[in-house]
């Protein structure tokens, strides 16, 4: 059930109950969770299980989609393509578990999400953002062709239990998403 996106090194798929423990541990790490808007820290196992059940039950073709990202059968992160409202542009978001930082997975996940938004959802424009204190995410998005469009001074983060400055970015249809051919192409 649901979409599966294969890249050279990764599989993006709907989350499964077997992901709950790793999801709780990796996504709940404060260094990960604070760079997202909706992941708490700590992230109790029961909360991860509930999120998985809700995500699977809510998935519909042409709708918001959350993916678990795995490499060689191990969960290494997550990502998604979503709209904040019916009239909004499609937006991507992603996270990578700390043990897997620095290997180019963010670029590979981002490219896969952009292609999914364009090819499966018909997105002409894809948007993204990152907290101002997460410039590494901004570098990934720039590598994918996104450009800065402004600041959102007070975007909420559940793990921060408050608001923090965020940078908004946009990728227009005229920009082609890189097709990554080797891990070296994805390295950041």
Image (tube, rainbow, N blue to C red):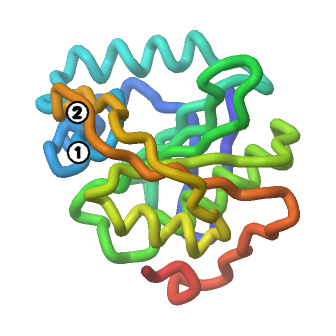
- Local secondary structure at mark 2: helix
Q: Is residue 150 left or right of residue 97?
A: right
Residue 152 position (above or below residue 83)? below
In the rendered image, which residue does mark 2 sit on? 24
Q: Residue at x 22, y 42 (%)?
A: 34
In the rendered image, which residue does mark 1 sit on? 26
Q: Is residue 33 left or right of residue 79?
A: left
Work out which residue is located at the far bottom of the displayed protein and give it.
184
Q: Nearer the viewer, residue 111 or 18?
A: 111
Quarter residue 148 falls in: bottom right
- For the N terminus, the quadrant is top right
Query: Alpha carbon of mark 2 to alpha carbon of mark 1: how far?
Result: 6 Å
- Local secondary structure at mark 1: helix
Q: Looking at the image, do the residues carrying marks 2 and 1 touch, with CB atoms under 8 Å apart?
A: yes
The reply to whether residue 69 is in sight is no
Quarter residue 142 falls in: bottom right
Q: Residue at x 65, y 28 (%)?
A: 83
Q: Residue at x 19, y 37 (%)?
A: 28
Q: Position of residue 15 (x, y in %)?
A: 48, 31
The reply to whether residue 97 is in sight is yes
Q: Is residue 165 left or right of residue 91?
A: left
Q: Position of residue 86 (x, y in %)?
A: 73, 18
- For the C terminus, the quadrant is bottom left
Residue 26 position (above or below residue 148)? above
Q: Residue at x 28, y 32 (%)?
A: 157
């Amino acid at each position: 059930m649901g979409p599966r996106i294969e890249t050279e090194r990764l599989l993006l798929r709907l989350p499964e109950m077997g992901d709950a423990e790793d999801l709780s541990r990796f996504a709940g790490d404060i260094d990960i969770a604070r760079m997202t808007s909706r992941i708490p820290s700590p992230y109790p196992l029961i909360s991860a299980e509930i999120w998985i059940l809700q995500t699977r039950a809510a998935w519909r073709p042409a709708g918001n989609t959350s993916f678990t990202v795995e490499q060689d059968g191990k969960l290494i992160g997550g990502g998604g393509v979503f709209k904040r409202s019916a009239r909004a542009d499609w937006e991507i978001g992603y996270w990578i578990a700390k043990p897997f930082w620095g290997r180019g997975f963010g670029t590979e996940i981002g490219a896969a999400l952009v292609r999914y938004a364009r090819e499966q959802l018909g997105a002409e424009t894809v948007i993204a953002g990152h907290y101002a204190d997460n410039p590494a995410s901004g570098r990934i998005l720039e590598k994918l062709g996104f450009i800065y469009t402004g600041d959102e001074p007070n975007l909420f983060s559940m793990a921060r239990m408050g608001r923090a400055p965020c940078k908004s970015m946009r990728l227009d249809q005229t920009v082609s998403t890189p097709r990554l051919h080797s891990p070296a192409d994805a390295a950041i």
